[in-house]
Image (cartoon, rainbow, N blue to C red):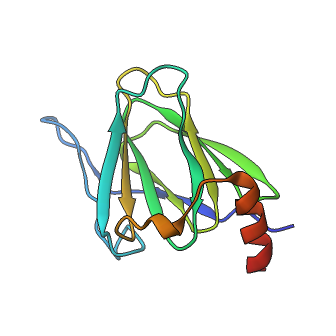
């Protein structure tokens, strides 16, 4: 059985009475070159995001505000992680199915990605994902 391949990364949190600051630097505390940044917000209650896997893309997912859960699946094992700290990122590696659920009111999800958008890198069908991962071993 293969183990889920992810990592929770604590980003530097600089505490200041005027407001806290967190920094994400490529190849320092983010273990890849950042080629794209995007964020989701105003996700209606009960809705999900994600529902796909990537063949080559690495992502660092951060709850900038509020909270949500990320369920990771490698085809053999699943794990759900609660993200609710803006100084903590979830590193999702290639060949991992992900869904984002349980968004709190006002939640903002920011994603740092290792590649520009490429449709060919996405796997949107779970059965296709299972076939793809079996061929990777």
Q: Is residue 21 left or right of residue 35?
A: left
Up/down of 96 relative to 107, above or below: below
Q: Observer-nearest residue: 116 or 120? A: 120
Where residue 54 appears, as percent x and y from the top left, is 55, 64
Up/down of 106 relative to 29, above or below: above
Residue drawn at x 38%, y 71% as measured from the top left: 115
Image quadrant occupied by the N terminus: bottom right
Residue drawn at x 60%, y 54% as measured from the top left: 124
Residue furthest to the right: 1
Q: Is residue 92 left or right of residue 71?
A: left
Residue drawn at x 78%, y 80% as measured from the top left: 137
Residue drawn at x 35%, y 27% as measured from the top left: 42
Up/down of 25 relative to 40, above or below: below
How many labels sit on residues?
Answer: 0
Where residue 7 appears, as percent x and y from the top left, is 57, 61
Where residue 107 appears, as percent x and y from the top left, is 38, 30
Where residue 55 appears, as percent x and y from the top left, is 57, 71
Quarter location, residue 114: bottom left
Q: Does residue 58 appear anywhere in the picture?
A: no
Residue furthest to the left: 18
Quarter location, residue 2: bottom right
Q: Observer-nearest residue: 63 or 15? A: 63
Q: Does residue 98 appear anywhere in the picture?
A: yes
């Amino acid at each position: 059985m293969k183990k889920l391949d992810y990592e929770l990364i604590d980003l530097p949190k600089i505490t200041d009475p005027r407001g806290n600051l967190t920094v994400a630097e490529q190849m320092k505390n983010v273990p890849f070159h950042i080629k794209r940044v995007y964020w989701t917000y105003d996700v209606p209650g009960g809705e999900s995001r994600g529902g796909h896997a990537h063949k080559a893309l690495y992502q660092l997912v951060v709850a900038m505000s509020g909270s949500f859960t990320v369920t990771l699946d490698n085809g053999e094992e699943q794990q759900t992680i609660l993200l609710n700290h803006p100084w903590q990122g979830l590193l999702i590696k290639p060949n991992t199915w992900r869904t984002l659920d349980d968004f709190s009111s006002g939640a903002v999800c920011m994603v740092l990605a290792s590649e520009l958008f490429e449709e060919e890198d996405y796997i949107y069908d779970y059965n296709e994902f299972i076939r793809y991962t079996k061929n990777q071993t």
